[in-house]
Image: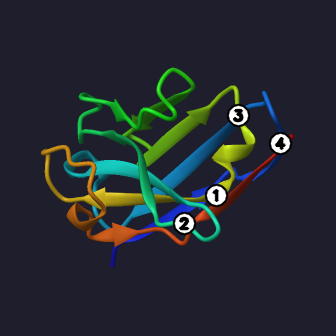
Amino acid sequence: QVQLVESGGGLVQAGGSLRLSCALSGRPSSIATMGWFRQAPGKEREFVAVISNLGGSPNYADSVKGRFTISRDNAKNTVYLHMNSLKPEDTAVYYCAARWSSLVFTTIAAYTDWGQGTQVTVSS
């Protein structure tokens, strides 16, 4: 059974940094394209970042480009989202998701397994 568990969320002041982690179990992460998505209150879930199964092809939403970095350690079955220069508009529940393919997609429907989410709150 595949399980994804996010951690690392919390409350941070604007301009601060956080690192989110997503631990994958049940299947080797090396065969999964991994994505980060977020959902703010009253808004739809949106794409944040994606990385291919072997760590290539990182892609970011325009709103986080230059501030967020996605990375992975397949030896640890873990994907990370490094978030710098955080803004109040980054406040959301952040989810990681797995797509069992090397093809990189940014659409929610392309991902089959999801974590439970971790809350990130950025105060002004």
* Label 3–label 4 contact, CB within 8 A: yes
Q: Residue at x 65, y 45 (%)?
A: 90
Q: Position of residue 39 (x, y in %)?
A: 54, 62
Q: Give the residue number, with chain letter if any, for mark 4.
A: 12
Crowding near the residue tagged with mark 3, few <14, some 14–19, many ≥20 C-alpha atoms within 10 Å: many
122, above or below 55, in the image = below
The span from disc 3 to disc 1 (Cα, nearest Å) is 12 Å
User: Of tags 4 and 1, which is closer to the observer?
Assistant: 1
Q: Give the residue number, with chain letter if any, for mark 1.
A: 92
**Residue 12, picture quadrant:** top right
Query: Disc 1 residue type?
Result: Ala
The span from disc 3 to disc 4 (Cα, nearest Å) is 8 Å
Q: Residue at x 24, y 42 (%)?
A: 53
Front-most of 27 and 16?
16
Q: Quadrant of the N terminus?
A: bottom left
* Label 2–label 1 contact, CB within 8 A: yes
Q: Quadrant of the C terminus?
A: top right
